[in-house]
Amino acid sequence: QVQLVESGGGLVQAGGSLTLSCAASGSIFSINAMRWYRQAPGKQRELVAGISSGSRTAYADSVKGRFTISRDNAKNTVYLQMNSLKPEDTAGYYCNADIQRIGFISPANYWGQGTQVTVSS
């Protein structure tokens, strides 16, 4: 089995910063792309940022210049550094990754349980 566990969410004032972490554990052979999504109440889940196994990154226009995604392959962990937070960043943040398990030929897609980020004005 594979698990993704997020941490680091919380309540912060507008203009503040938070860093989210997502650690993958289990029978992991390799991890390909890792991503952060978010979902606000009443809205669809949206892709915030992604990072490839070679650390190439991509961001949603709404967070470019404010958020930074990174990964530590030795720890099977992906991070999301969020600066200059705005009330509209308030959402549940979810980790997503393409992980190949030991003994399996192809990677599968996995989700974490989510962590709440609330930005007050």
Image: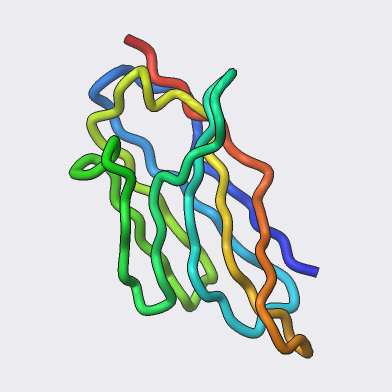
Outermost residue, top direction?
A: 121
| For residue 1, side relative to residue 76 (left or right) | right
Placement of the N terminus among the 4 image quadrants: bottom right
102 versus 36 height, above or below: below
93 versus 90 height, above or below: below
Q: Position of residue 45 (x, y in %)?
A: 55, 36
Placement of the C terminus among the 4 image quadrants: top left
| For residue 97, side relative to residue 101 (left or right) | left
| For residue 5, side relative to residue 36 (left or right) | right
| For residue 96, side relative to residue 67 (left or right) | right
**Figure quadrant of residue 92:** top right
90 versus 49 height, above or below: above
Q: Residue at x 28, y 39 (%)?
A: 63
Q: Position of residue 19 (x, y in %)?
A: 39, 43
Q: Residue at x 27, y 41 (%)?
A: 61
Q: Position of residue 10 (x, y in %)?
A: 49, 28
Count of numbered circles in the view: 0
Q: Residue at x 63, y 73 (%)?
A: 99
**Figure quadrant of residue 98:** bottom right
Outermost residue, front direction?
A: 44
